[in-house]
Image: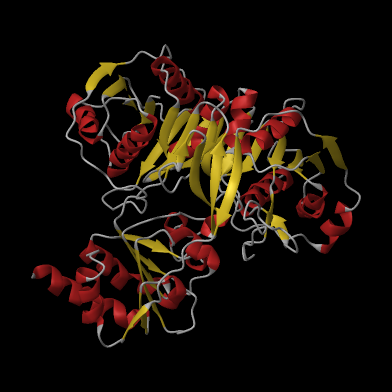
Amino acid sequence: MKILVCISNVPDTTTRVRFSNDATRIDLEGVQWIINPWDELALTRAVEMKEDASSPVSHVTVLTAGSAAAEPTLRKALAIGADDAIRVDCVSDDAYFIAAQIASVAGNRDDDMILCGIESSDYNGSSVGGMVSEMLQIPSVSAISSIRTEDGKVLITRDIDGGKEELSVPLPFVGIVQKGIAREPRIAAMRGIMMARKKPLQVVPATEAEPLTAYREFRLPDPKPPCKMIAADNVRELVNLLQNEAKVL
Amino acid sequence: MSILVYTENWDGKFKKLSLELVSYAAAVAEKTGGGVTALSIGRVEHDELSKLGAYGASRVLSVDGDQSGGLDNQLFTRIIAGAVEQTGSKVLVMAHNNSGKALAPRLSVRLKAGLAAGVTALPESVDPFIVERKVFSGKAFGKIRVLSSTVILTLPQNTFEVKETGGEAIIESFDPGVDLSSAATEIRSVKKQEGRILLTDAEIVVSGGRGMRSPDNWGPLEELAESLGAALACSRPVSDEGWRPHEEHTGQTGKIIAPNLYMAFGISGAIQHLAGVSSSKCIVAVNTDKDAPIFEAADYGIIGDALKVIPELTAEIRIARDK
């Protein structure tokens, strides 16, 4: 069983967001890049399954659609335990365009599972995984908090509003994963980092696709008025303010 | 330009979110012209369906059927796409929740319709179609232009005010030509949380962080939640430590919520936590550290020990509510 993990190269979560002078672009100068946190969990789970001798998972490939700046992130994914990496050479902030790149690569492979994080921490669209599945005309399951194999079948736990569902899904499929899928993202060990240097990283040209959206302009959120402080021995005043000023009680 | 709004049901009932979606669709229709059609999938009673009319839907299409197969993304995509095509809708409005996130991207591909996910307001213009959404986990807003002639918008909970129009909808059954029982995914079991307010539905949320010091200290927080009719949440370290289930984790990688009132006890307010709660209408923070970043996001703050403040707060709320 083979797994393709789609990863997005994103600015570190604590990065301050800055724009170009005309605010039409995000300024990415000097940004620290990381694997999108949800994709990192997907990768961790994929590698865990590969290492589990009782699981039929035998191979994990990581795939990203991005510029050469994403390659250190791909190397990190290889260090975590992926067997090989593919980068589609392109730059876009349109989810449809990115999904078309992934689908174009995945459509020519025979992976059994395509895993994606439920959103990326840059554009937060929760879009790419679902789009890939529709482009490939294969099932998708979203909000996955657990995934395992049993007798060659893939069993999934999915979060629904107010509960959980256990389900099985035919292969191949796109699994869109969220928190819970792995306990913690795996940190690459020194041996993994050494081995990653020798693992294959293939760069492929972008396929043609018409973007469906484009960003026009960015802005920062409106500044918040300062926090009103209340003395710790005057909890009654807090209740009074919540009732009569904020009107939320 | 007619608009289709997909209104999901929960055991045959709609929620406030459903009405928010219809109200939003009606407000978009004022800009685009044309009527609002709501689509319902599964067994929903006539009276429940007619509620949607009172918020601006002029037509309700109902795909009556057994829903025990759960949400099969391919099947639901086919049904919703069929309704968009049949009604000639140019805008599709859906919830930015679990099912919306699962379906909207598939629909985007199927309909060749640009997706603006998690919009924060009404479109700024409809020709060209420009609408604002949050990016970088709430650290910025971006105006996105949808380039295709059909547009899909997903709206997060508690983003748009419900507006009653007092209208009436014509309710029609809709045959999507799709067999609801032909799902590729097979549900083996379902576990539902009983008798508690859902975190994503709650108007008030009380949340505990490491400042609660031990999982054994949650009793008073539960009591406070009960006195307020609130749901419980927690910070990431608390769920990572296994003090609380991961379903309660709010923050960037956990649940993103927007209640009317969010109360954070012993939570320092790391940027990842704020990403999940900053859309709350009012934030209260209780923390011993006066420099904790949570106070920059909060509307009201108390510098003090959460374990001391919580029982006092419960008592004061009970007094205030009894008045």
The quadrant holding residue B202 is bottom left
Q: Residue reaching furthest left?
A: B323
Percent position (x, y) of residue B260? 31, 59
Q: Residue reaching furthest right?
A: A198
Q: Is residue B175 above or below residue B95?
A: above
Look at the image and tell me in which quarter the C terminus of chain B lies. bottom left
Q: How is the image coloured?
A: secondary structure
The quadrant holding residue B199 is bottom left
Percent position (x, y) of residue B275? 50, 60
Q: Is residue B286 above or below residue A6?
A: below
| Residue placed most toward the observer, B307 or A233 | A233
Q: Is residue B59 above or below residue B201?
A: above
Percent position (x, y) of residue A243? 20, 69
Q: Is residue A130 left or right of residue A64?
A: left
| Residue placed most toward the observer, A175 or B18 | B18
Q: Is residue A34 left or right of residue A68?
A: left
Q: Is residue A69 visible?
A: yes
| Residue placed most toward the observer, B78 or B114 | B114
| Residue placed most toward the observer, B286 or A114 | B286
Look at the image and tell me in which quarter the N terminus of chain B lies. top left
Q: How many marks?
A: 0
Q: Is residue A1 visible?
A: no
Q: Is residue A163 above or below residue A151?
A: below
Percent position (x, y) of residue A214? 61, 40
The quadrant holding residue A107 is top right
